[in-house]
Structures are given as structure tokens and as C-alpha cells.
Image: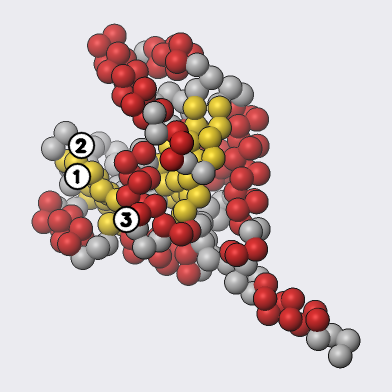
Amino acid sequence: MDRTGLLIILSSPSGAGKTTLARRLMEWDPALGFSVSATTRPPRAGEVDGQHYHFTSLEEFRAMIEADQMLEHAEVFGNFYGSPRGPVEIAMREGRDTLFDVDWQGGQQIRASALGGHVVSIFVLPPSLSELERRLRARGQDSDKVIEGRMEKSRAEISHWAEYDYVLVNDDLDETEARLRAILTAERLRRDRMGGLGAFVKGLMEEDR
């Protein structure tokens, strides 16, 4: 049966496992697309335009905002980042779902957009703040000061948990992945998302007439 594609928002504080879960979800369902963000920052070594980001000029980015072609956008350290609307709308019409890796602010903007009725939002929590800090330190990439800043930002992000449709505590990666799969499967099967269901039922009712 025909189905309009979903916009799946996956958010979490840094270190809660969002990136790993997103990768696993896309390995489970290769048809699940990922929203490639546009940015005004220059490419870094090894980054490919259209794969890692859509690299644009500031003028092009602002023009997309003015034309309502950004589902969400934000300025981070002097550079702009955002989710282009066009590829998402194409995927929706073709019945393909799109996964968004955005924070609570980006999630708010997408839910408030014209496509908000097709959003399924999921927030991933760590089992504890001490475990979250341990994971950040285990990366071995950041100084104590940077980790303190990440923890403070994490507390601010977690405070928005109630804005999401689903909240998962990632205390076991495999179990959390299984719950994510269950959410996506159930949302895809909702009656109001099945475009051809009414016609199918009508045909059933007329079979013996």
C-alpha cells in the first residue's frame, strides 16, 4: 500500500550513542535515507560535497532560508548549518523515510514546519550522567574543560526530553537498537499513514456482492 515517507528525528546529548544507533538503523534498513546538512563552512580534508555536507556560500544559504527551502537551520561558531527541504520532500513522495541527526532546537523547527505532521521524534538518554561523562572521557579527544562544557550542554539538551514522541534510555546498545526498530515499524504501520488502506478495505467489502 502507498505510504508517505516519515521524518525521523533522532536527538541525544553527545556521548549517549546517537551516532552509533543511527548507523545501525540504516544498516538494518538500507532504504532509510539520511538528511545531509548544508553548511557555509569550508570542506575539511576528506569531506565530499553531497556526501558529508552540501557546501554552500553564505549568500546561497540565506537565499534558501528566504525561499523556505530549509526545514531547520542554526548558526554555530560563525558558520550556518541546515537541513534542505527538497530532498526530504522527494523521499516523502516516494514513500521513503528520512533520518535527521539534529538537536532539540532543530527538532523544534522541523516539527513546526509544513512537514511537521510526518515527524516521529526520538530522544536518547544515557543511563546516568556519570556514565555519559565516562564515555566522553573514554574517547580521549577532549580536554577537561571541553568535557565540562559538553556536560553542561548535555544537561540543557536533556531538559527538553518531554518534547519528543519517544524517549529511550541507552543502557544496552543492542536493546536500544531493537526498541528503535520497533518504533519505526509501528509508526510505518499506523492506519493514518497507509494511503491505499481505505480502497483496499472497500474492495474487501465488495468481494461477495
Residue under the point 76% across and 82% down = 203
**Which comes sooner in the sequence, label 1 or label 3?**
3
* Amino acid on which disc 1 is placed: Phe
Residue 143 shows in this picture: no
Residue 52 x, y percent position in the rendering: 33, 45
* Amino acid on which disc 3 is placed: Leu
Spatial distance from mark 1 to mark 3, Cα to Cα?
A: 13 Å
What is the crowding at mark 1: few (fewer than 14 residues within 10 Å), some, or many (at least 20)? some
* Amino acid on which disc 2 is placed: Val
Disc on res. 71: 3
Q: 68 or 81, which is in the foreground?
A: 68
Q: Residue furthest front?
A: 162
Mark 1 in CB contact with mark 2 (< 8 angstroms): yes
Mark nearer the viewer, 1 or 3: 3
**Quarter of the image where the N terminus is located:** bottom right
Compared to 112, does 26 lie above or below? above
Disc on res. 49: none
Compared to 112, does 170 lie above or below? above
Q: Residue furthest bottom?
A: 209
Label 1: state its secondary structure: strand
Disc on res. 76: 2
Spatial distance from mark 3 to mark 2, Cα to Cα?
A: 17 Å
What scheme was used to colour the molecule?
A: secondary structure
Label 2: state its secondary structure: strand
Spatial distance from mark 1 to mark 2, Cα to Cα?
A: 6 Å
Residue under the point 32% across and 55% down = 71
Q: Is residue 178 left or right of residue 62?
A: right
Q: Is residue 16 left or right of residue 176?
A: left
Residue 105 x, y percent position in the rendering: 32, 41
Q: Which residue has dot 1 on it?
A: 80
Compared to 75, does 31 lie above or below? below
